[in-house]
Image: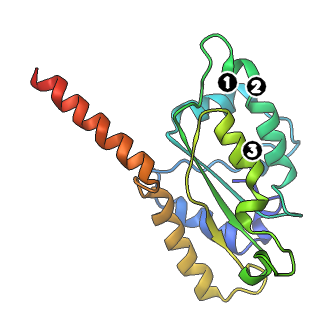
Amino acid sequence: MAHPNLQQSRVNKRWVEELKKHPGEVTVHELYGAYPEKVLDIGREQALLAECERLVLQFPLQWYSTPPLLKQWLDEVFTTGWLFGPGGKAVAGKELLIAVSIGGAAETYEAGGLIGYTISELTRPLQAFANQIGMTMLPHFKFHGANQAADELIESSAERYVRHILTPELDPRIARRRMLNDMKQKMQASL
């Protein structure tokens, strides 16, 4: 979770509150809260990543990108040796999901809209990053219109958000791979 001013946020703050209702299923790690001086504990961050199966990057879209500390986190935590060196592949096979709040309306972020690019296009570097390090990119969770959203919309988005990130089979490729692995294990068990 990377929001430079979480206490002033309506959407991301509410999402975090909802996530914290699921302590056995979700680990909430607030980067700006953990690192107010912006000096990361790389070993701690890598250990947290090693424990997770699905990494969710939750952030508000800022100037068509991630907040600065999230970019720093990506640059410093995902070191070459940890990812690719001897004994590397630290996150290969894990899942990555982007949960992003966007100030502008949905029609702003489409071809012909004011911005002219979709959120998927604007987050393409994160998708390329996931591909490069062997993570499986899952469908984004997006909330448009965060600047003007009614409280009821924010509330329902928090519930949908938790359901979305806890859905085991977000990607049909994952469902198929898990099904094949289950079948393989059953066949091996019966031999």
Three-letter amino acid code at the position of disc 1 = Leu
Disc 2 and disc 1 in contact, CB within 8 angstroms: yes
Q: Nearer the viewer, residue 183 or 160?
A: 183
| Residue depicted at x 68% and y 67% | 12
Up-down relation of residue 148 to residue 162 (above or below): below
- Pick the front one: 60 or 111: 111
Q: What is the x, y in percent for residue 33? A: 76, 50
Q: Position of residue 93 (x, y in %)?
A: 52, 34
Say which residue appears at 65% left-offset and 32% top-offset: 133
Distance between the alpha carbons at the discs numbered 2 and 1? 6 Å
Task: Name the N-terminal-most of marks 3 and 1.
Answer: 3
> Where does residue 90 sit, x and y in percent of width and height?
60, 25
Placement of 24 over or under 81, stated as above or below = below
Q: Which mark is residue 97?
A: none
- Which residue in the protein does label 3 denote? 34
Asked if one can make out residue 95 in the rendered structure from this viewpoint, the answer is yes
Mark 2, mark 3: which one is toward the viewer?
2
Residue type for callout 3: Ala
Q: Which residue bears the numbered disc 2? A: 79
Disc 3 to disc 1, C-alpha distance: 23 Å
Q: Quadrant of residue 86?
A: top right
Residue 4: name its quadrant: bottom right
Quarter of the rendering containing residue 180: top left
Classify 10 Å Cα crowding around label 1: few (below 14), some (14-19), many (20 and above). some
Point out residue 40 in the picture as x, y percentages from the top left corner: 80, 34
Sort mark 2 into few (<14), some (14-19) or many (20+) by Cα contacts within 10 Å.
some
177 left or right of 74 in image: left
Question: Which label number is shown at residue 83?
Answer: 1
- Which secondary structure, mark 3? helix
* Disc 2 residue type (three-letter): Thr
